[in-house]
Amino acid sequence: MLDVSKFENRLRAELVAHADLYKNYLLTLIDLMADSNDGIIDQSIEEDGDGTPMLGEKGHATRYYAIVMKHRLHGSASHSNFQQMKAEGGP
């Protein structure tokens, strides 16, 4: 669990660090998991070649996130394509 928290904190910090590249947008990291422990496996149970249960990989996580980009100017015209949005964000 600690490694997942470290990863999520680093991901949020990187998002903040790159926010100046997209000054006209709010960048938000959204956790798509229902619970903070979803997708975290202490030790998995896997099947051997003959179907016998056995201990598998220890300590791994599968988590899903989305980064939402929201334009800061309320009511502004939407872009017609990604290239225009990217160009407005700067180099």
Image: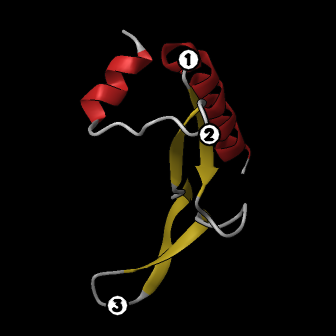
**Which residue is rendered at x = 35% and y = 81% of the image?**
48
Image height of 36 relative to 34, above or below: above
Give the left or right position of residue 69, taking residue 37 as reference. Answer: left
Marks 1,2: beta carbons within 8 A: no
Residue holding disc 1: 23
Residue holding disc 3: 51
Q: Position of residue 66 (x, y in %)?
A: 51, 49
Say which element carries label 3: loop
Calculate the distance from the C-alpha at mark 1 to the C-alpha at mark 2: 13 Å
> Which quarter of the picture shows residue 26?
top right
Give the left or right position of residue 41, taking residue 46 as reference. Answer: right
> Which quarter of the picture shows residue 20?
top right
Image height of 10 relative to 62, above or below: above
Say which element carries label 1: loop
Residue type highlighted by circle 2: Thr
Image height of 38 relative to 16, above or below: below
Say which element carries label 2: strand
Residue holding disc 2: 28
Image height of 7 relative to 23, above or below: below
